[in-house]
Image (cartoon, rainbow, N blue to C red):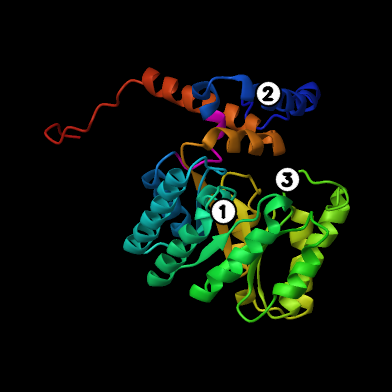
Amino acid sequence: MDIGNRQPHLSYRLSMPLFNSILSRILPLLPKWAARPFASPYVAGTTSSSALKVVQRLNAAGFSATLDILGEHVESSAEARRVRDAYLELYELIYDQGLDCNISLKLTHLGLGLSGSPAKENLLDLAGKARERDNFLRIDMENSDYTDETIALYRECRKLHESTGMVLQARLRRTLADIEELCEPGFNCRICKGIYPEPEELSFTLANEIRENFSLAVRAILSKGGYAAIATHDIELIDSLERWFMENEISPHRFEFQVLHGVPMAGRLERLLERGYRVRVYVPFGEDWFDYSIRRLRENPRILGYVIKNIFSRRRKAAAQQEVPARRQPDDTVPA
């Protein structure tokens, strides 16, 4: 009997979301070696070599990419300089390999918040390298404690390298005002919903409010002549924005869609490519993979089911291959 096309039993379908949710809460308690298989869909390994291989595959499939070395809130200026040096090397590797890939970084990873303010010097070093290699630099936004400092450093960076972009969060109430102040020729801004918990006086808390502010932010950037990087997996939001683009004859060269590496989108990304849109995949990597992966798994527990299915599928396939006897190779000396 072929059970491959059978519908899962109702109790199974009802229990899997609960199982995934429980497992996503247990994973942080496991040793890293046990959690690694569940993290692997989201993180492109721990080295630049492994991450660049992922970028190569994405480029071959028609996707652009952006690389991020995982981590934030370094504890010393020396550690911040090591992060800077790793990014400097990444720009060289991207250039040498001719990849369609830029870099996204967090300023606390470069030393923002440390005494002596090493973040500015490190950031400007990277802006100089990006300019030298004709590449782009994206400054990520962190929690609201750093918003003003991040905007100030973004402005400093753009004086040195115009191909610098930033990120604003739809969750924050101030975002539309920030766009009004910042949007000028060459303004390139990623809009995301935002993951940082914020006090209610600073942020929207309801999903529909955040979605609405997201849409308004994208429209504001494009209406003022900027470039919008639309970072979301929200299909409803993507659909509504796509309709607005068509109604207002917005050129696909003025925006791009961005998604996280490893998040399933049921073929939607390929359809966006077919329609002539640029789709960029955020590819994180590095030794600090654990906390990032746990956060992603909590946001999307369904991925646990996919991972478990793939693990057992590979094992069954390997076992089946061992059981099948080797086929006799044709012998050209034996007449037919």
Q: Residue furthest front?
A: 116
Residue 139 in view (yes/no) = yes
Report the residue at 59% width, 66% height from top.
154
Report the residue at 56% width, 55% height from top.
281
Residue type, label 2: Leu
State the SS at label 2: helix
State left or right for residue 245 relative to residue 71. right
Residue sitting nearer the eye, 76 or 147: 76
Viewer-nearest of discs 3 and 1: 1
Report the magenta residues as a range.
Answer: 37-45
Is 22 included in the stretch rendered in magenta? no
Identify residue for label 3.
196
Q: CA distance from mark 1 to mark 2?
A: 32 Å
Residue sitting nearer the eye, 267 or 172: 172
User: Sequence order check: which comes first, mark 1 or mark 2?
Assistant: 2
Q: Quadrant of the N terminus?
A: top right
Identify residue for label 2.
23
Task: Estimate the x, y position of residue 97 in percent, counting from the top left.
Answer: 34, 60
State the SS at label 3: loop
Q: CA distance from mark 3 to mark 1?
A: 15 Å
User: Sequence order check: which comes first, mark 3 or mark 1?
Assistant: 1
**Mark 3: few, some, or many residues within 10 Å (few <14, many ≥20)?**
some
CB contact under 8 Å: marks 2 and 3:
no
Task: Estimate the x, y position of residue 240 in percent, counting from the top left.
Answer: 80, 64
Residue type, label 1: Leu
Viewer-nearest of discs 2 and 3: 3
Residue 107 shows which numbered tag?
Answer: 1
Residue 149 picture quarter: bottom right
Report the residue at 52% width, 44% height from top.
70
